[in-house]
Image (cartoon, rainbow, N blue to C red):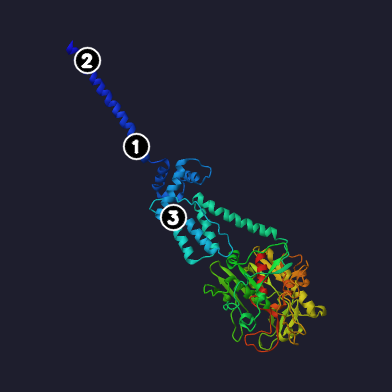
């Protein structure tokens, strides 16, 4: 009995020991599981590792399902999954640790620099890098290289925008698309509203207002483009209040002019001024406005492409042409005071021959180079007087023969025929060149008082707007030019009435040599009134 009892006890003890061992193992297993929980990788980190381990093909194609899933979740403001919130914090920490600039952040900085002149400075936020791996994918290296070049070369905003659109087309992540697309839409919407809202805007109707931010360039500078005889800051003139006035059209808004905006709008385009010395002033004004009056060694002289080279014995060439390589924008001027085709009657005697002034034929330069123009601005007016025609030895021709019509022989009749003829001819060319936009600028007013330019006429007033500040008439003050474009697709650039209010803005008696003589009450001081003509032109492009 004792042996049996002892044997039973031994058996029971064995069972008890086995049970204790099992319980101990279970307890230890449970305890270790609880302690190891913080060290188990979360789902988000597993996704991050998957991204790091992705091969070049997945990175280039951007077709990784896990990548797309993670980006959608991170960018979704309505997401409530806690692990993803933790992931975003981890990713931000990784970005801070590596201190790398993402392509979007570089574009943001470049954009703020390039658009400092009145452009949108919206910040890009919550940018999630595709990978926190220290190994840079080929597409990232390419992007960062391109962006570094852009920043280093200080390219215009158009270049930055173009680069941004290229990055979108390469299949970049959706968070980057979310940053770029609203800007594109905003720009398109603004341009569309400007086009529709200003379609019927009468820019010639409005008033002059004070603007302390003017002028757009210094009268002491811009020596690369501005003729010194028109730079009134270089003369003995001491009043410059006329530089602080801006034209404000009634019931319509003009976009603020900046060189960057103009070049972006005129990318891969050519703007041609063809006309008299007032057209030359508008040309020089625009060159100063686009460059801010600063020296620009990158701008190319391409006059030779248009035959605008100084002939032997000539004082100056027949015009100038300059190209901004950064946007492939060309601005040129060609001297044609009458907008008539001129040809020597006796080519064998160029020094003494008269010139046939073909009233019904556009200049040969315009006929030759019109296909290369995108914007054309024509003007004529002040050379239409008997003295100028005789001094230049111009003989009126119509239909290829000397004019015999007395009505046309009258100066007003001759100008009327020419202006209508050229407007008609340009209008007929427009369907052949759908990208061409043509303007006929109205006459710039003269302000000679108590005589004319050669009979002691003066323009001594230095008080701005002494004759009024507002234009209220709907019709143009140059009915001849307005009538010429009526019923055509040639647009009227009406600057007559608004310039009529600014008699204090002329060169007047001032000159660099400070010698007494005839006053110039025809041409304008620069910076000055022609800047406004270009602001109105810019609003119409």
Q: Secondary structure at mark 2?
A: helix
| Whole-percent x, y for residue 327 in the image | 55, 66
Q: Quadrant of the C terminus?
A: bottom right
Instruction: Give percent across and percent down for residue 325.
Output: 54, 69
Q: Quadrant of residue 369?
A: bottom right
Secondary structure category for the residue under label 1: helix
Choose the circle earlier in sequence order: 2 or 1. Answer: 2
- Left or right of residue 157: residue 25: left
- Cα separation, mark 3 vs mark 2, equals 77 Å
CA gap between label 3 and label 1 equals 40 Å
Question: Could you tell me how many numbered marks the image carries?
Answer: 3
Q: Relative to 516, does residue 126 appear above or below in the rendering?
A: above
Q: Is residue 148 visible?
A: yes
Which numbered disc, 3 or 2, marks the residue that appears first in the sequence? 2
Q: Name the front one of labels 3 and 2.
A: 2
Q: Residue at x 70, y 87 (%)?
A: 518
Going 32% across and 30% down the picture, which residue do you hit?
A: 27
Q: Which residue is mark 3?
A: 140
Kindly identify the residue that appears in the image at 25 percent across and 20 percent down.
15
Q: Nearer the viewer, residue 297 or 38?
A: 38
**Residue 203: image location, x then y, percent:** 71, 66
Q: Earlier in the sequence, mark 3 or mark 1?
A: 1
**Circle 2 crowding by C-alpha within 10 Å: few under 14, some 14–19, many from 20:** few
Residue that mark 2 sits on: 8
- Residue at the front extreme? 2
Is 495 placed left or right of 369 in the picture? right
Position of the N terminus by quadrant = top left
The answer to whether marks 2 and 1 mark residues whose Cβ atoms lie closer than 8 Å is no
Residue 64 at least partly seen: no
Q: Is residue 376 above or below residue 224?
A: above
Disc 1: which residue: 35
């Amino acid at each position: 009995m004792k042996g049996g009892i002892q044997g039973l006890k031994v058996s029971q003890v064995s069972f008890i020991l086995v049970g204790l061992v099992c319980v101990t193992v279970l307890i230890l297993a449970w305890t270790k599981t609880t302690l190891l929980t913080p060290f188990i990788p979360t789902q988000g980190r597993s996704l991050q590792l998957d991204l790091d381990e992705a091969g070049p093909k997945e990175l280039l194609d951007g077709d990784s399902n896990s990548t797309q899933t993670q980006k959608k979740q991170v960018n979704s403001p309505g997401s409530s999954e806690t692990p993803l919130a933790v992931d975003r914090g981890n990713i931000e920490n990784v970005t801070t640790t590596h201190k790398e600039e993402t392509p979007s952040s570089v574009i943001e900085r470049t954009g703020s620099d390039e658009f400092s002149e009145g452009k949108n400075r919206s910040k890009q936020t919550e940018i999630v890098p595709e990978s926190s791996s220290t190994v840079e994918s080929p597409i990232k290296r390419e992007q960062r290289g391109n962006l570094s070049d852009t920043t280093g070369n200080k390219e215009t905003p158009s270049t930055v925008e173009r680069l941004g659109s290229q990055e979108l087309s390469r299949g970049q992540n959706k968070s980057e698309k979310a940053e770029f697309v609203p800007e594109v839409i905003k720009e398109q919407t603004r341009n569309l509203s400007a086009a529709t809202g200003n379609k019927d805007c009468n820019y010639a109707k409005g008033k002059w207002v004070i603007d302390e931010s003017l002028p757009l360039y210094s009268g002491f500078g811009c020596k690369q483009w501005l003729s010194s005889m028109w730079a009134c800051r270089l003369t003995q003139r001491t009043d410059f209040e006329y530089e602080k006035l801006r034209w404000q059209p009634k019931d319509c808004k003009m976009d603020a002019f900046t060189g960057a905006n103009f070049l972006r709008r005129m990318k891969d385009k050519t703007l041609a001024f063809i006309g008299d010395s007032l057209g030359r002033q508008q040309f020089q004004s625009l060159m100063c406005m686009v460059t801010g009056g600063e020296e620009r060694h990158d701008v190319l002289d391409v006059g030779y492409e248009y035959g605008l080279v100084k002939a032997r014995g000539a004082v100056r060439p027949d015009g100038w042409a300059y190209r901004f390589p950064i946007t492939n924008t060309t601005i040129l001027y060609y001297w044609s005071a009458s907008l008539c085709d001129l040809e020597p009657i006796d080519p064998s005697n160029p020094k003494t021959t008269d010139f046939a002034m073909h009233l019904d034929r556009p200049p040969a330069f315009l006929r030759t180079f019109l296909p290369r123009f995108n914007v054309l601005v024509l003007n004529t007016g002040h050379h239409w007087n008997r003295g100028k025609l005789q001094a230049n030895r111009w003989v009126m021709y119509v239909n290829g023969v000397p004019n015999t019509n007395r009505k046309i022989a009258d100066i007003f009749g001759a100008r009327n025929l020419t202006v209508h003829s050229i407007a008609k001819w340009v209008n007929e060319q427009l369907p052949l060149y759908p990208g061409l936009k043509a303007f006929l600028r109205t006459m710039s007013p003269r302000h000679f008082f108590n005589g004319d330019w050669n009979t002691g006429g003066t323009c001594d007033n230095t008080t701005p707007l002494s004759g009024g500040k507002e234009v209220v008439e709907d019709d143009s003050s140059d009915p001849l030019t307005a009538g010429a474009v009526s019923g055509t697709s040639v647009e009227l650039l009406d600057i007559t009435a608004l310039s009529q209010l600014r008699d204090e803005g002329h060169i007047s008696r001032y000159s660099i040599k400070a010698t007494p003589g005839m006053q110039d009450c025809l041409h304008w001081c620069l910076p000055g009134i022609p800047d406004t003509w270009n602001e109105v032109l810019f609003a119409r492009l």
